[in-house]
Image (cartoon, rainbow, N blue to C red):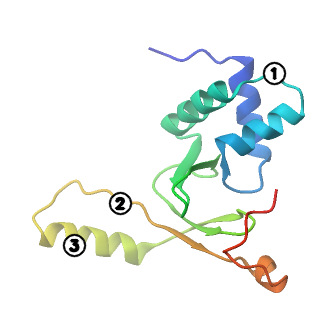
């Protein structure tokens, strides 16, 4: 069944596109609340789930275990470098990872294997400021 494209989902999509990196549903909801959109947290969660399922948003788990999202800049399988401090994300090619994953799966008798590789660290800008990954993300 096709999802209706509501104004709320469009506003969540727009806010996600405006975010500088990965963002949690709660952070995105707070930004929308500050703009007096009237969009509830449950609606934000549903919209993000729909965007992730359709491939319009990347979803991954932060080091703290929270689901975080960002507007997807490319289609197909890809990986990210993500700053723990500011949330900046860079899409990266990881051909060596692809080769290793296929080889490891085959060596263990697995087929149709899938994987997720996201690398968390501190971006150059945050490192220059002396920020560390143990700090809370800047909002």
The residue tagged 1 is 38
Which numbered circle lies on residue 15? none
The mark closer to the camera, 2 or 1, is 1
C-alpha gap between disc 2 and disc 1: 37 Å
**At x 64% / y 18%, what residue is drawn?**
5
**At x 81% / y 78%, what residue is drawn?**
125
Q: Are marks 2 and 1 in contact (CB under 8 Å)?
A: no
Which numbered circle lies on residue 104? 3
Q: Quadrant of the N terminus?
A: top left
Q: Is residue 83 left or right of residue 15?
A: left
Query: Residue 70 versus residue 137: which sits nearer the camera?
Result: 137
C-alpha gap between disc 1 and disc 3: 49 Å
Up/down of 8 relative to 82, above or below: above
User: x%, y% of residue 103?
Assistant: 22, 73
The mark closer to the camera, 1 or 3, is 1
Report the residue that reaches farthest toward the right: 35
The residue tagged 2 is 115
Query: Residue 137 versus residue 22: which sits nearer the camera?
Result: 137
Dot placed on the residue nearer the N-terminal end, 3 or 2: 3
Dot placed on the residue nearer the N-terminal end, 1 or 3: 1
**At x 82% / y 85%, what residue is drawn?**
128
Within 10 Å of disc 2 (Cα), the crowding (few <14, some 14-19, many 20+) is few
């Amino acid at each position: 069944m096709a999802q209706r494209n509501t104004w709320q989902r469009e506003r969540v999509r727009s806010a996600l596109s405006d975010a500088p990196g990965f963002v949690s549903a709660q952070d995105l909801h707070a930004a929308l609340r500050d703009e007096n959109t009237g969009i509830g947290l449950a609606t934000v969660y549903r919209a993000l789930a729909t965007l992730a399922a359709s491939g319009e948003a990347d979803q991954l788990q932060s080091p703290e275990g929270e689901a975080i999202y960002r507007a997807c800049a490319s289609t197909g399988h890809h990986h990210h470098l993500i700053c723990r401090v500011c949330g900046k994300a860079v899409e990266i090619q990881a051909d060596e990872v692809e080769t290793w994953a296929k080889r490891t799966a085959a060596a263990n008798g697995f087929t149709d294997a899938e994987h997720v590789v996201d690398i968390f660290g501190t971006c150059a800008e945050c490192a220059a400021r002396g920020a560390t990954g143990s700090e809370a993300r800047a909002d």
